[in-house]
Amino acid sequence: MTDSGSRGQKWVVCLLLAVAVLAVFWPALHCDFISYDDPDYVSSNPDVQHGLNWQSLQWSLTTAHADNWHPLTWVSHIVDYRLYGPKPAGHHLTSLLLHATNSVLLFLLLNRLTGALWPSALVAAMFALHPLRVESVVWISERKDLLSTLFWLLAVGAYARYAERVKLQMAKGKFFYALALVFFALGLMAKPMVVTLPFVLLLLDYWPLERWGFGATLPWRLIVEKIPFFLLAAGDSVATFLIQNHLGAVESLRGFPLSARLANAPVAYVRYIVKNIWPASLAVYYPSRRLGWLEAGGAVCVLVAVSILVMRRWRAQPYLAVGWFWFLGMLVPTIGLVQAGTQAMADRYSYLPSAGLWIMVAWGVRDWIGHRPFLRTMAALAGGTAVIACMVLTPLQIRYWQNSGALFQRAIDATDDNYLAYYNLGCYARDQGNYPQAILNFKKALSTEADSALQVNPVRTYNNLGYSYLHQGEITNAVANFDKALALQPRYPEAYFNLGRAFLANHQPDVAVDCFQRALALDSSVAESHCQLANALVQLGRPAAAIAEYSQSLQLRPTLDEAASNLASLLATCSDRSLRDGAKAIALARQASEHSHGQNPAILGTLAAAYAEVGNLSEAVATAQQARRLALAQNNPALAGVLESQMRQYQDGHGGAHP
């Protein structure tokens, strides 16, 4: 039996890898969408939710939404939403299957390249089951990691076939070369991080493909044949930088100085190594912090020392250099020299680069034990223990991803001064209606933002803090925070919108109108802004203008029930009879009632008024009675009283009453 293992052994390893991945990551199916990126990618993205058609394909190919150009990732999410709808379990299942596929492909690729069964199996198992994989697999927005890696592995596999055929002067070499290029292009269309593929191919040319030898100059033909790969990588890199820079995703040197980036890069490399060995205190976000030159210098010394060591062993143990520079090189796009976002590092960035470290370990142990049975047994026990440890720790890490609250509380517990975690935890509390807790977390976010090593713009935090105060009924505090947000970012339509809502709640419709108009001047496509402007216009006694704004709101979003119900009310009860339209009011009120499954008594009251407007008083009385019973059942006696008065008017033969 050769070291590469029998065909049966390979199939057993593939089966065990796939089953282990599904078993370990199965709890992910019970995790929810999270509030960080998932709304942009899936849960609140109408372009993804409209289904797979020519329009959505065109959008996928042309959009820079979410600060990237990755059409294959968008198509993946569109297909998933078509299959599973808004339920996250199906989306998670697709990610699990992709990760299992990648794990098996990595094993098969390494086994084919090196002919070594058990080292290949160990690398694949650590790649598959390590807790650092949780972020890429369980975070639905990180589907791009899984897809890009899939095509990266296929590209390397096709390139290996090409190299074998060139070496043996066999036909079909050009076919596999072209196939590798196609797979590489598809990988770039899933996530630009795979731009380092040409560099890795040059490493693989040395070991294990042995297309050039130690001490020899790198053959020009090997460089020339990579030119199409480098051109694809360069084009995608430039496009990604321009898109992210235009959309504000790339941090400026003012916000994140070059000195801070140069200090963070070596420290981040060392932290990735440590977390591969000891995966403790993992978090969805690691805030950048001030680093002393001693810490940065120590990290540089570690990296240089390892680099010198592997270069000295380049001839005797080529896998050490290949694995090490695989790890270093693949992390270059995300190490922070060109900073996208404010994180110091991210677990997801280690998805494929970490395989290089495990290549060093697996083949290093193989060489060390040689043919000594005792050491072989000890190595097998150590490897098995490491794999089992991962199978225990990874499900524990998945628990933190069950919802946004657990995820960001974990980030707060695992890191220091994590302003983004406090901010997102505040958003989670806000969405749950827990406004006191939201206010507390937004205040903590502001205090940690002030102490941050970066120049963080807290405009969103002020806006959300104001929103929470508004829902607490603290209008003065709400207005103060919206003003702070606008002082930092004057062209911020959401803050103007919320400021308008605050003045509307404070019975200042004239000021509210000005705020809503400012919001619409900055972004006229927001249906809610037109709706709230209409509400303010109603309070100012301008029904004709209000009808126009409600209509515009519904044109932008036909399912906006507040606009449909309020427009129906105006068309049914307006004091200016020339503006009334009972039939249209009935249609709008029915539409809004259907969307609320007949469980909104106010909308039913509007429907009753619409029936009264067209003279159908018996239907108006029945609908008003139903609305009153529902209001009482929902413990809303004030609304029930209004509906009872409305019902009596209809019983007395009077229509056109306000609901």
Image (tube, grey):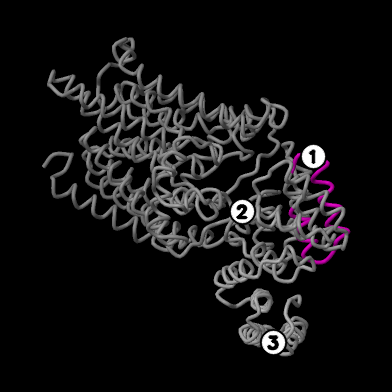
Quadrant of the image occupied by residue 431: bottom right
Q: Amino acid at mark 2?
A: Ala
For residue 632, the mark is 3
User: Looking at the picture, does residue 617 appear above or below residue 236?
Assistant: below
Nearer to us of marks 1 and 2 is 1
Q: Is 243 left, or right, of 191 in this rendering?
A: right
Residue on which the image places disc 2: 411
The extreme front residue here reads 578
Q: Earlier in the sequence, mark 1 or mark 2?
A: 2
Q: Residues within 10 Å of mark 3 (few under 14, many from 20)?
A: some
- Which residue is found at the position 79% from the left and 65% from the top? 576
Residue range in magenta is 464-492
Residue 159: x %, y % from top left? 26, 27
- Which residue is found at the position 68% from the left and 39% from the top? 289
Residue 600: x %, y % from top left? 63, 76
User: Looking at the picture, does residue 153 appear above or below residue 430?
Assistant: above
Where, quadrant-wise, is the N terminus in this rendering? top left
Q: Residues within 10 Å of mark 1 (few under 14, many from 20)?
A: few
Residue 326: x %, y % from top left? 40, 30
- Which residue is found at the position 17% from the left and 19% from the top? 167
Q: Are marks 1 and 2 in contact (CB under 8 Å)?
A: no
513 is within the stretch colored magenta: no
